[in-house]
Amino acid sequence: MVKKSLAALACLVWGLSTVGTAQADSSERFPYVAGSFYPKDPAVLTRMVDGFFEKAPDRAPAENPFMVLAPHAGYVYSGPAAAETYKSIHPGSVDTVILLGPCHRAAFSGASVWTRGSWTTPLGVVEIDTSTAEAIVKDHPEFQYTEAVHLTEHSLETQIPFLQRRLGTFKIVPILVDDASPSNCRSLARAIISATEGKKSLLVASSDLSHYHDQATARKMDSEALDLFSRGDSEGLRRTFASGETEMCGAAAVLTALEATRLVGAEGKILLQSDSASASGDTGRVVGYGSCVFYKTGKTPAPVGSETYTAEERAQMLAAAREAIAKKLGVASVEQPALSADPFALKRAVFVTLKRQGRLRGCIGGLYPSEPLGEAIPHMAVQAAFSDPRFPPLSANEWADVQIEISVLTVPERTTADEIQMGRDGVIVRKGMRSGVFLPQVADETGWSKETFLSELCSQKAGLSAEAWKDPATELYRFQVIHFSDS
């Protein structure tokens, strides 16, 4: 029973008797888990945190991290991993810390952003960066402060004493997020990037890893989760979260943080993987912890999911498309196995393009995911070959000269003309009942400027005026494409 209680403290609040001072003012937050997750006495807390820092290797390079992953359990369990994370930051080098974490006690959409006042720990008071917080919530009614989800949540509070001992003076923007949908994560990440532009800021993703498996199982699960996280593979994380292969209690926080790293072009590095057994001695039910940092590289951000499919997986998709057309033509073809395993079981929007002797011969696809990838590819391949109204059905005589291109789309998101990046983003225009779409490769193939691209999209594809994209009533959406061919 003792070991079970110790493991519980590794992530959850252990009983109401440890609750901190009651709230007197919603703009000022007092510690809730002081005395349970970490010492209430300032001197004892200082010695504990400094002790963790002394034992952690000095990993701080010349550049500060853009984003870090840190655990939020009781310090006796996760303190070493937290110290590894925060020792990568140069003292006094950060003005604002954006804290992203989960709420363990409530479910809600959007995000809850604390916008004013201060947070107190036994080590002192930390002010809220109100201007940055308000910039994040501006134009985002889904990002509103909800007092109830913050006051008894430990995932952000546990980060602050480490930051106080490492950074000195700084401000915070506490954000709790429970909605891990791609659209919410992308929207919140963009708002954070915009609000912190030009500022000395740090993004902290608060999350523990697997919960209550035996140590061997936990180590395997956590190793895979950290590998996917450090590579920025949000699609891989989503897939393994859904299958139960990995666990992270701060899923929405880490996926939002990964979207932010994609937007700025940052790469990750794992610092430490550990678990609660080192403190509790219980290897039968452990909680896993990880430390990871992301540094800006200066590289152009890659399309979402650009590393999702291996060369072998891409070859399998192309073979499935070719076989579907060959069967319809009655041409002999090598039988290909059905695309049923991950990642082909996930619903994805797909375009299949056929070219013959360098010229377009058919292109059909969907903008929104409606069927598993393994079914969408042969379906769209057959449609492109035989149902594109611009061309007659493909004949067997043409088949030997046909090249196949596959474009797997990310979910479209609302955007503005300024945010569109030529060559990276596909664009959908919509006004009233009219709409049109250009894939990203149209920009590369035509060499158009952004203005010409949008004008042609409106006039050529949607039947609107060439200047319609400038009208506030016209909706623009962007998406990215994982594009490959057999040529």
Image (cartoon, rainbow, N blue to C red):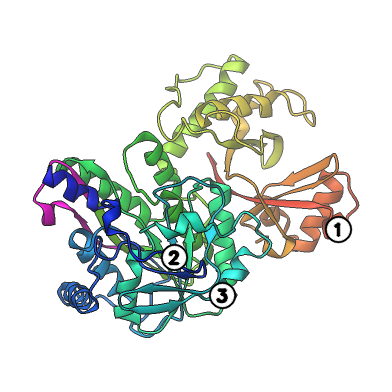
Of 22 and 468, the residue lying toward us: 22
- How far from the left and from the top, in percent, is residue 135? 62, 70
Nearer to us of marks 2 and 1 is 2
- Tell me the residue at 25%/61% (across/down): 37
Mark nearer the viewer, 3 or 2: 2
> Is residue 281 within the magenta segment?
yes
Q: What stretch is highlighted in magenta?
A: 270-287
Q: Is residue 337 magenta?
A: no
In the rendered image, which residue does mark 3 sit on?
130
What element does badge 2 sit on?
Answer: loop
Q: Disc 3 vs disc 1: Cβ atoms closer than 8 Å? A: no
Checking the image for residue 69, the label placed there is none
Q: Is residue 368 above or below residue 392?
A: below
Q: Mark 1 points at which residue?
A: 471
Q: Quadrant of the N terminus?
A: top left
The residue most toward the left is 281
Residue at x-position 52% and y-position 79%: 199
Q: Distance between the residues labelled 2 and 1?
A: 48 Å
Can the viewer see residue 351 in this picture? yes
Which quarter of the figure has residue 69?
Answer: bottom left
Name the amino acid type tagged 3.
Answer: Thr
Which mark sits nearer the N-terminus, 2 or 1? 2
* Residue 401 placement: quadrant: top right
Between 44 and 223, the one nearer to me in the picture: 44
Residue 273 placement (x, y as % from top left): 22, 57
**Identity, as a three-letter code, of the amino acid under mark 1:** Asp
* Residue 287 % position (x, y): 23, 49
Q: Earlier along the polypeptide chain: callout 3 or callout 1?
A: 3
Residue 23 got which mark? 2
